Image (cartoon, rainbow, N blue to C red):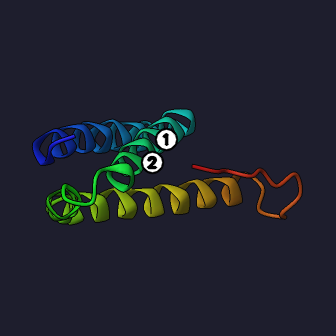
Amino acid sequence: MTADELLSAMRAALEAEREAIRRLDGDAVTQAAAVKEEILRGVHGAPAAERPALVAALKELKIELRRNLLLLAHARDYLREAIELCHPTGRGRLEAKL
């Protein structure tokens, strides 16, 4: 995998994850996370001579990765608040996982 291929694949996975977060689609968020993990396994398994370029490419994605992390945190908080509003006594508490 070249650095350009890595960036392209990871950006596509991050975009899919962002869309899933916006839709509050937990299954799609999980699927996007699996794709990201597979990409990172590819980086880890790359020959040692190729890794520095791949790691440098990943550093370009820090802002996008943080943006998705922030969206996930907000989505979790919104779901928690919605659950609490529906069940203010805490009875019948629902678990929301993204």
In this rendered view, identify the residue nearer to me: 43 or 20.
43
Amino acid type at circle 1 is Ala
Q: Which mark is residue 34?
A: 1
- Tell how many labels: 2
The alpha-carbon separation of the residues under discs 1 and 2 comes to 5 Å
Q: Which mark is residue 66?
A: none
Quadrant, the N terminus = top left
Q: Position of residue 29 (x, y in %)?
A: 48, 41
Count residues near mark 1 (Cα–Cα under 10 Å), then give few for <14, some for 14-19, many for 20+: few
Q: Position of residue 87 (x, y in %)?
A: 78, 55
Q: Secondary structure at mark 1?
A: helix
Residue farthest toward the right in the current orientation of the protein: 91
Image-based side of 37 in relation to 77, left or right: left
In this rendered view, identify the residue nearer to me: 76 or 2.
2
In this rendered view, identify the residue nearer to me: 22 or 4.
4
Q: Residue 39 is drawn in which quadrant? A: top left
Q: Position of residue 11 (x, y in %)?
A: 22, 43
Image-based side of 72 in relation to 50, left or right: right
What residue is rendered at 44% in x and 61% in y?
A: 74
Q: Report which residue position mark 2 lands on.
A: 37
What residue is rendered at 32% in x and 52% in y?
A: 43
Disc 1 + disc 2, Cβ < 8 Å = yes
Q: Residue 22 is drawn in which quadrant? A: top left
What residue is rendered at 42% in x and 44% in y?
A: 21
Q: Position of residue 93 (x, y in %)?
A: 82, 55
Amino acid type at circle 2 is Glu
What residue is rendered at 15% in x and 43% in y?
A: 2
Q: Secondary structure at mark 2?
A: helix
